[in-house]
Amino acid sequence: MGKRGPKAGSGGRPSKPLIDKIVSGNPGKRKLKVVKFSDEVCAEFPQPPEFLIDATKITGAWPSATDIYKSTVEWLKTTGCLKLIPKDYIEEYALCKARWFECENKNTALGLLTRHPTTGNPILSPYVKSSGDYLKMSDGAWAKIYEVVKANCTSDFRQEGSSNDDIMERLLRGKG
């Protein structure tokens, strides 16, 4: 027997970012939920954890997990949503993104093909599969962070030319 419809929460129109609701004058006229913090809650965010600092720094132009962690924290400070994001989300994103950079570095250095250890036939490098897996994990981790920012940020957090911008969304937004 079937499942009887879609999973809960998977149907319907996606929610608009809070900043878009504010700019459009709150067309639904419902009270907008804005999270306020006291000064004690907004203390300084901690430094990167030891396992990110101990991760090997990739030589060349590739950023380390610590660099990614710090830049993500700085961006979240500008949005005002830093305290809404669990520290684990930022750590997960930084580690997965750094590992993706590491796999891409190996793909660049070694090429996409390698030889099978027993037969000697050419095969796809294992770093290609690992690279795809780490990219998928880092995108999932970033989606969790971005969803919280999108739902709670009262200032315009989107940057023109950002890799996180959806081209169709920009086209439709610029139409009016």
Image: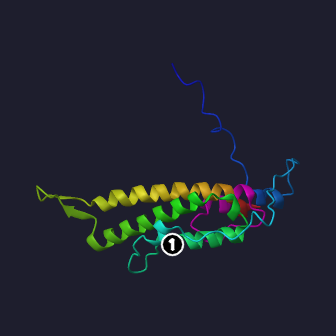
Give the residue number, with chain letter if any, for mark 1: 66
Direction from residue 54 to residue 111 in the image, left or right: left
Question: At 43% from the left edge and 80% from the top edge, which residue is drawn?
Answer: 61
Toward the top, the furthest residue is 1
Question: At 77% from the left edge and 66% from the top edge, which residue is drawn?
Answer: 155
Question: At 59% from the left edge and 69% from the top edge, which residue is drawn?
Answer: 72
| Residue 102, position as x, y percentages in the image | 38, 69
Mark 1, secondary structure of its residue: helix
Q: Quadrant of residue 174?
A: bottom right
Residue 168 is one of the magenta-drawn residues: yes
Count how many numbered circles sit on residues in the image.
1
Residue 117 is one of the magenta-drawn residues: no
Instruction: Say which of 132 and 175 sits in front.
Output: 132
| Residue 29, position as x, y percentages in the image | 88, 48
| Residue 32, position as x, y percentages in the image | 84, 52
Q: Quadrant of residue 8?
A: top right
Q: Main secondary structure of the magenta part?
A: loop
| Residue 108, position as x, y percentages in the image | 32, 72
Instruction: Say which of 49 and 176 sits in front.
Output: 49
Q: Is residue 78 above or below residue 133?
A: below
Q: Is residue 60 above or below residue 21?
A: below
* Residue 2 seen from this side: yes
The color scheme shown is rainbow
Toward the left, the furthest residue is 119
Question: At 57% from the left edge and 62% from the top edge, which residue is drawn?
Answer: 90
Q: Residues within 10 Å of mark 1 (few under 14, many from 20)?
A: many
Inspect the image, locate mark 1, and give the three-letter code of the amino acid beneath it: Thr
Q: Which residues are magenta?
A: 150-171
Quadrant of image for the C terminus: bottom right
Q: Is residue 176 above or below residue 7?
A: below
